[in-house]
Amino acid sequence: MSATVTEPAVTKQAPTGRRRARRRSGSRLGKWLGNGLVQALLVVIGLVWITPLAGLLLSSLRSAQDSAGSGWWTVLASPGQLSFDNYSALLGNAGMTQAFWNTVMISVPATTLVIVIAALAGYAFAWLEFPGRDWLFLLVVAMLVVPVQVGLLPVAKLFGQLGLFGTIPGVVLFHVAYGLPFAVFLLRNYFADIPREMLEAARMDGGSEWRIFTRLVLPVGRPAIASLAIFQFLWVWNDMLVALLFADSSSQPLTVELQSQVRQFGSNIDVLAPGAFLSLIVPVVVFFAFQRHFVQGVMAGSVK
């Protein structure tokens, strides 16, 4: 009788202790961030980070003659230099607009597929029992150490045989294949921290594995999924190495098109500046759109 009484008492105290530790860690972090010196330092870091973005924006709104004659900071004294003529010319540049839509058609599917497949695999590795599960997960973790450069030529040869070389689906498949190991590793570890009692209670209520995954696991794992979406999207959007090899002139993204514009024209700042700002502003918007979930994921990982 005494053993059966003390065991539930221990299991009830453990979650309470973890919650108290999280509150203490969160309060210490909040006090540290509330320090005036720390806030001033963060403001300085923010200004340093945003200065190149502001300079690129102002350069994209100046003519080629103004950019050649003076720096972008002169706009602060002469705002009459600003105009949207460069963006009008950019929209009329068929190569740049096609490259932008190619980048969208590469980044969105590559991010979505990685999230969907990694979420399903992460839940399976964390909570489903099947033969060889641990060995298969070790294989996934081992793939994290394989550099991208190792697979470029073999995969290019394979895509050539399959008719995928030089196409958008080929670029998407490569990004998905090399993004999955890290994504599966991240989501599996996050899903494994979900209390087992929650899943067992859902199963006792008659919930299927699919219903538990969609109604319970995915909402709980939203911060980790949002963090993964940001990392994957930024990696694919800013990639140039894979696109240089696997994309042809009709499927190349914006990074490759900007590089070719530099090689062809050298100093056409009136085209390069708005194109570079367009390539930069989209990841910034995506980051701030998912910022709240991203911060939740980082904070959750720091106080567990």
Image: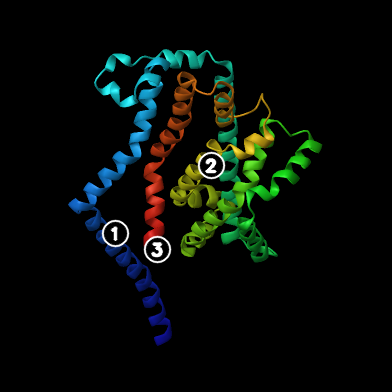
Horizontally, residue 183 falls left or right of residue 84, namely right
**Pointer 3: what residue?**
304
Amino acid identity at mark 1: Gly
Residue 43, given in percent of the width and then of the height, sits at 25, 43
- Farthest residue to the right: give it: 161
On screen, 117 above or below 89? below
- Farthest residue to the left: give it: 36
Residue 154, given in percent of the width and then of the height, sits at 75, 46
| Separation of marks 1 and 3 at Cα, in angstroms | 11 Å
Residue 101, given in percent of the width and then of the height, sits at 56, 25
Q: Nearer the viewer, mark 2 or mark 1?
A: 2
How dense is the environment of label 1, judged by Cα within 10 Å: few (below 14), some, or many (20 and up)? Answer: some
Residue 122: quadrant of the picture = bottom right
State whether residue 61 appears in this view: no
Give the mark nearest the N terminus, 1 or 3. Answer: 1
**Pointer 2: what residue?**
235
Seen from the viewer's position, the closer of residues 235 and 299 is: 235
Q: Quadrant of the C terminus?
A: bottom left
Callout 1 secondary element = helix
Report if the CB atoms under discs 3 and 2 are less than 8 Å apart. Answer: no
Q: Which mark is residue 26?
A: 1
- Residue at coordinates 53% horizontally, 43% vertically from top-left? 232
Amino acid identity at mark 2: Trp
